[in-house]
Image (tube, coloured by chain):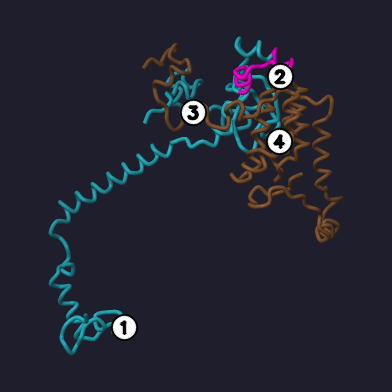
Amino acid sequence: MLRVSSTLLGAAVKSLKPSSSAAVVSVRFSHGKEESPEEFDQRFVDYFNRSDIDGWEVRKAMTELQNYDVIPEPRIVSAALRACRRVNDFALSVRFLESIKIKCGSKKNVQTIYPYILQEVKPVLDELGIATPEALGYDKPELFIPQPEYWWEHKWYKDYGYDKKVGYEF
Amino acid sequence: MSQLPRALLFPRLASVGRLRLLHTTTAVKSGGGDVWWGPEKAAGREVVGYGARGDPGSYSDRLDYWYPTIRFRKDDGVITPIRAKEKGDWKQLSTEEKKLLYRYSYRATLAEFNAPTGYWKPAAAWSFSIMAVVLAYFVLLHQTVYKGLNPPTMSNEYKEAMLERQIDMHSEPITGPAYKWDYEKKQWKK
């Protein structure tokens, strides 16, 4: 697990060992045992590797992973991509690759850690035929997404097929 | 500034008559809260996922809940054959089909989500318009209402007399007139 805070500049990949003081704190104040980074990884990998996983559960695990201040380790990414293959959802796999960029955070991290993860999971991408967002041209904005509460041109109705409806003739 | 018409913003309101709007009491709603249009907006979409709260709702792109509950578009003649193809080997999918699969599931990519919208321009236009109107009104008042009504203390003669008096009284000897005035040569210090 890359337990690097997204806001941290500097070191790209760093594996933290639980320090002795943290262990003492966990004994005193927390219930049960503190999860080590390896156990964290294993938990997600095991979840994604379940053979009877469905689309709802894949998204739930991904959302949960998104909630941690963590850039997922390549083995979690591989397991998640394989889970997408098992539930036959291609769009979800591309979406998940984009979420890694969100978790990388700063521009510098996106330029260093994201290519590293892609390079590590490349065998899986090639095996499953998953295209990266860059290969689809999604690293740059493709469409403009209008927000009608702020601004709406009358000529845009035509683009959305509203010109055939009553009350939208302009 | 043009906005969506009422019929599009409130479809159900458009179908009931205008008279309904005049009623002073609101209809009783279950839960007592506001009307939630999620199910109407989501109608026909495949419910696929977890979303923000783990229940089927409306579509929204959010960075913290990156996997929406429903697909963005309904299944139609274009996507159904591609969905069937998706069950097979993904290497057989062309780039166009891959992009269609993404676009039918999600509205905006990450790059589009992060892109600047340009809506600061209408906001700036409104702000500067209001400031211009206020400034024009201010100038108008000064040209008409307050013309010639300045208090005597604002005249040059009064200000010069006040300065002379300050020099005579040796007032403010560190930073003020008494410091800057040369009392021996009877002139301002160079």
Mark 1 or mark 2, whichever is nearer to me? 2
Give me the chain letter of mark 2. Answer: B
Kindly indicate the quadrant of the structure image that contains residue B35: top right
In the image, what residue type sits under mark 2? Trp
Mark 3 nearby-residue class (10 Å; few <14, some 14–19, many ≥20): few
What kind of element bears circle 1?
loop
Mark 1 or mark 4, whichever is nearer to me? 4
Q: Which residue is mark 2?
A: B90
What kind of element bears circle 4?
helix
Q: Which residue is mark 1?
A: B174
Q: Is residue A43 above or below residue A137?
A: below
Q: Are marks 3 and 1 in contact (CB under 8 Å)?
A: no
Mark 3 vs mark 1, CA separation in Å? 63 Å
Q: In the depicted view, which residue is nearer to us: B97 or B167?
A: B97
Kindly indicate the quadrant of the structure image that contains residue B61: top right
Question: Could you tell me which residue is drawn at 71 percent across and 19 percent down?
Answer: B90
Mark 4 or mark 3, whichever is nearer to me? 4
Mark 3 or mark 2, whichever is nearer to me? 2
Q: Which residue is mark 4?
A: A119
Chain A drawn colour: brown
Q: Which residue is mark 3?
A: A144
Q: Which residues are magenta?
A: B84-102
Q: In the depicted view, which residue is nearer to us: B37 or B188?
A: B188
Chain B drawn colour: cyan
The first of marks 1 and 2 along the sequence is: 2
In the image, what residue type sits under mark 4? Gln
In the image, what residue type sits under mark 3? Phe
In the image, what residue type sits under mark 1? Ile
Q: Residue B158 at what x, y percent from top left?
A: 15, 73
For the residues beneath circles 1 and 2, the answer to whether they share a chain is yes
Q: In the depicted view, which residue is nearer to us: B132 or A97?
A: A97
